[in-house]
Amino acid sequence: MMNNAFAQPMWLNGPAPGQFYNFMGGNTQAELPRELTTAGPFGTKHSTAAITTGSSVVGIRYAGGVLVAADTLVSYGSLARYQNIDRVFKINDKILLGGSGDFADIQSIKRSIDQKMIEDQCCNDGVVMKPKSLASWLTRVLYNRRSRMNPLYIDVVVAGVDEAGVPFLGNVDLRGRAYDDYVVATGFGRHLALPLVRERKPKDRDFTFEEASNLIRECMKVLYYRDTRSIPQYTVGICSASDCSVKGPFKVEENWTFAETVEGY
Amino acid sequence: MSTIGTGYDLSASQFSPDGRVFQIDYASKAVERSGTVIGIRGKDCVVLAVEKIIADQLYEPDAASRIFTIEKNIGMAIAGLMADGNYVADIARQEAANFRQQFERTIPLKYLCDRVSGYLHAYTLYSAVRPFGLSVLLASWDEADGAQLYKIEPSGTSFGYYACASGKAKQQAKTEMEKFKFADMNTDELVRSGGKIIYQVHDELKDKDFRFEMGIVGKETNGVHLINDASWSQLAIEAGEAAKNADDSENEI
C-alpha cells in the first residue's frame, strides 16, 4: 500500500514513508464504505427483511414536553428472544429516540448518532443537536439507503424539545418518510395506539402531562393485550425543558379474569 | 548551531554527530516560547490549566483556545504551535472515534496516548516532514481507571504524571507543583491550586495580558470534560487572583 506521492521507499522491502501513517499532503485514497460500492462479480445480496425486531413505539406530545414508550422486547421472528432491552434511548439533553424494526439496524444508526453527539461536544460551542435536526438528518440517511436498494429496516420515533423548550415529536421510517404530530406510533401501535390517542385529544389545547402519561399507560396496556410481539414491560422516555431521561421499566397492569368466561377457541 | 552540529539541522531524518536530531530540539523551542500549560491529577479529578497569552487585544476572548475535548471524558491541552495543536486534536478525535467504533466503549487514555505519541514520533523520522512543535497533555477520568494524566513531547516520548507542566514557565510551575500533594486533593482544592499556579508563574513584566483557561474532568463533573465551565473557572480565577495579590504585597514589604 503506497499512499505517499512525494517519497520513494527508503530501502527494499522496508516501509515507505507514510506507510504506517497518513501524512498530510499524501494522496490517500479514502475507501468507500462497502454498501456504497458496486456489486461484486457474483452480485450483492441486500437484506430484504428484519430479523431481530422490536415492535411498537408510541410517542405523545404534551404541553411542555414529550413522552416516548416502547416495551423491552426484541423478538427473533415470533420468538420472544430478548426480553430486557431498552428501545427508548436518550441521545442528549434535548433528544429521545425510540426504535422499532430491525434491532441491529437500530443499534447501527444509534452508534452513528452517538458519535455525532461526541462531535457536538468536541466543538465546545454549547450548541447541541435538536430533535428536529436529528429527524431531518435521519430522513436523509434512510432515504439515501433506500435509494441504494439497501434500506435500514427501522421505524424510529424522534422526540424532544428545542432551545426554546418547544416540544417536537416525529417519526421517520425505513424509506425516509417523515411526519410530526402530537401523537406518533410505529408498528402495531399505529393501528391500536394512534386512534386511541386521537379520540381523546381536546380540540382546543394540547394534552397535559397527566393526560399524556395516562394515555401512554393505556396504550401500552392495549398493545400488550392485542400485539402478539409484545411483553408487559416497558420503558418511558420523558423529555421537557428541565429533564430528559428514560424511566422504568414499568409493568403493564394486566387482568385476565375475563378470560375465564371466554369460550370457543 | 555554529560548532559541531553545523549542517545537521535541516532534516528530521538525520542525526548530528553528537547524537541529536536538531529538528526535534527546535520543535521543543517552539514549545518553550508558548504560554504555560499545566496538568494536575487529584483524587478523583484532573485539571488542565492554561495561561493563554493574549497576543492581540482585538482577538475575541475565546479565540485560539488551547484546551480541547477529545472524547466525552478526555481533555487535551497544548503548549506550542496552535495550528499543529488543532491538527493533532483532530487526529486524537479520529483515534478515539475509531476505537469507539471497534469496541463500543471509550478509548482508554493509555491507549490514546500511545497512538498519539506514535503519530508524533512518526513525524520525527522523515526528511519530508517536520516534527510537531507541540507538547500535548492528555487528561481523563472514569469510574474504572480513575484520574489519569499523560504528557507527550515533540519527540513522541510520553509519560504518565501526577502533575506536569510545559511552556514558558515550565520550571517555575514544576517548583510550585512540588510543594503540593495533588494525589490526595479533592476537586475544589485541585481547581484552586490550578488557578494559583498559573497566576503565580505568569510573568507580568515580560508578557502581555493573559486569559486563564481550564479543562476539568472528574467525578464531580459526572465524567464529562468541561472547558471553561463558569463555576469551576471562577473558583480557580479567584484563588489565582488572591495568590497573585498575596505575592505582590509580599514584594512591597
Image: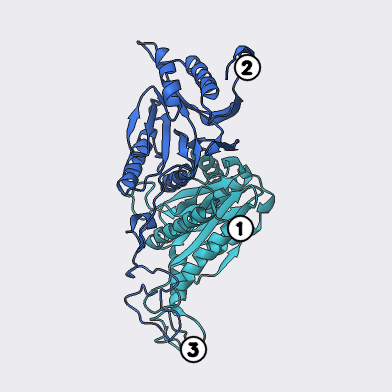
Chain colours: A blue, B cyan
List the residue tagged with mark 1: B163
Q: Amino acid at mark 3?
A: Pro
Amino acid residing under circle 1? Ala
Report the residue marked by disc 2.
A256
Mark 1 belongs to chain: B
**Earlier-in-chain disc, 3 versus 1:** 3
Q: Let me know if marks 2 and 3 both belong to one chain.
A: no
Cα distance in 3D space between marks 2 and 3: 90 Å
Q: In front: B39, or A252?
A: A252
Is A137 located above or below residue A36 in the figure? Answer: above
Name the front one of labels 2 and 3: 2
Please state the horizontal and vertical placement of residue A224, each as a whole percent of the image: 55, 24
Name the image quarter holding the N terminus of chain B: bottom left
The picture places residue A205, in percent across and down from the top left corner, at 37, 12
Q: Looking at the picture, which amino acid does disc 2 mark?
A: Trp
Residue A35 falls in which quadrant of the image?
A: bottom left
Which percent across, then down, holds residue B16?
Answer: 47, 86
Do the dots labelled 2 and 1 sit on one chain? no
Vertical comparison of B14 with B226: above or below: below
Work out whether residue B84 or residue B241 is closer to the camera in this orientation and state it: B84
Which label sits in the foreground, 2 or 1? 2
Residue at x-position 45% and y-position 65%: B134
Q: Is residue B199 visible?
A: no
Instruction: Tell me, yes or no, if residue B175 can be seen here.
Output: yes
Q: Which residue is mark 3?
A: B17
Labels 2 and 3 touching (C-beta < 8 A): no
